Image (cartoon, helix red, strand yellow):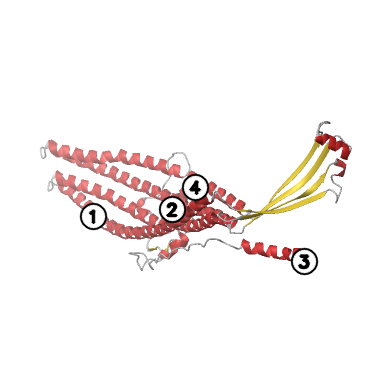
Amino acid sequence: MKTRYLKIILPVLLAAMQSCRVSQDVKLPDMHLPESYRTASEGDTTVIAKLPWRSFFSDPELQSLIDSAVSRNYDLGLALKNLEIARLNFIQSKQGNLPEAGLAISASSNRPSNNSLNGLTYGQFLGTKHVEDYTAAVDISWEADIWGKIRSRKEASLADYLQSEEARKTLQTKIVSMVSQNYYQLLMLDTQLEIARKNLALSDNTLKMIRLQYDAGQVTAMAIQQAEAQRLTAAALIPRFEQEISITENSLSVLCGKLPEAISRQQTLDKVNRQENLSAGVPLELLSIRPDVRAAEIGVDRANAEVGYSKARMYPSLTITAEGGLNAFRASNWFRLPASLFGAVAGGITQPVFQRKALRTRYEISKAEREKSIIQFRQQVLTAVQEVSDALIRIRKLDRQQDVLREKVTSLRLATANANLLFKNGKATYLEVIIAQSGVLQSELDLAGIEKAGLDARIDLYRSVGGGWH
């Protein structure tokens, strides 16, 4: 009767103990995020957070470069391998609740000395001078997850896998932004190289006019020297920009997983499709879209699992073992059923004693690590909001600077044309011509830099809201 009740109570008790958990998870803190970003414009209509990178970057040549980087970049390749390792570890952790089983087959023959106690015993009782033993057995061992230790390990492995996936996404957003910014850097350098060449040609014409006036005795040698200096200023820019173009091409090639090579491009900086009226969405969306914020959130989940695991290790563990199979001392009887069958079941409880202080220390450390993960989550959210806000400010102010610089360049180009015309007619000095040419050169270079900075700001906004990984 007692045995029957025990058979009913024991499974129920084990099931109840399996559901026990010795630690409580800490929830994510409420960040009290604002409803909109600082300086966000109500006129912004294009929500870019969920735009695939192929939709955000419309240039076919840039799309080809990004596609190559996503598939061939070595850093991304390493991230994919880390993801695969984490996936395999998670699959393995899901087997933690299953019993361990082993199959053993053995055969032995023992012939003791005739003068030994075993030899005399075998001869008197068994009528033989040697004993054979044949065994085929299955061993099973199972640990009951009473305190959630195994479940915590599984949750930690799942968090590792999810974090690896978010790390891959974070890296891809970075690679996409780096490729696009390097590509636009090339377009800017192409523009600046063309500006330098045009200014050099203009300086050559000016120098020729001044030489003619010098031959006519209208100007001094100083005029030729200053015109030559202005010409050399433009000439020195050409190898500088050519050098920067080659270095940028090398960098972009390596990002795309290729050996350094020339980068084909037909696009010009002033023809790039500049995304206008961009909307960053609302800060709350960062929690679900931006990969590094998601990784920080998962980090808190992992820390919770580690706390549960380290605390569960301080409690007793219940292990049940069973063994069964076939055993005989003659080969002819080995598989004779049911006489050769045997079995054994045992259960044991193990309580750490001497390691308890070390386990307690590990538990306290895991709690401190959990507090760190919460702080890191808060910090990551604030950093993300700041990066989005910074990008929005930069876009607005750089667009304004670009408008002003365009007006300045237009005015200086007109001033340069007028100065050259007046100089030919003897109504302007060579200094006015040189100053006008120097001003238009620097302003055109600055305008190209501002145009590129505006594109970079849009890329930064796209990355900071979590775009680029899909």
Q: Amino acid at mark 4?
A: Leu
Whole-angstrom CA distance, mark 4 to mark 3, is: 65 Å
Q: Which residue is mark 2?
A: 59
Against 290, residue 62 (above or below) is: above
As helix, strand or loop, the secondary structure at mark 2 comes to loop
Residue 436 visible in the picture: yes
**Residue type highlighted by circle 2:** Asp
| CB contact under 8 Å: marks 1 and 3 | no
Label 3: few (<14), some or many (≥20) within 10 Å?
few
Q: Residue furthest right?
A: 127
Q: Earlier in the sequence, mark 1 or mark 3?
A: 3
**Residue 208 in view (yes/no):** no
Q: Which mark is residue 16?
A: none
Q: Nearer the viewer, mark 1 or mark 4?
A: 4
Q: Nearer the viewer, residue 98 or 201?
A: 98
Q: Report the mark closest to the observer, 2 or 3.
A: 3
- Residue to which mark 3 is pinned: 1
| 221 is higher (above) or lower (below) than 380 | above
Residue located 58% across and 58% down the image: 148
Q: Residue beneath label 4, please?
A: 76
Q: Earlier in the sequence, mark 1 or mark 4?
A: 4
Side (left or right) of 415 relative to 132:
left
Q: CA distance from mark 1 to mark 2?
A: 29 Å
Task: Return the x and y of residue 331 as percentages of the image width and height.
Answer: 85, 41
Label 3 residue SS: loop
Disc 1 target residue: 408
Give x and y (percent) for residue 9: 70, 65
Task: Compare marks 2 and 4 and give the one earlier in the sequence.
Answer: 2
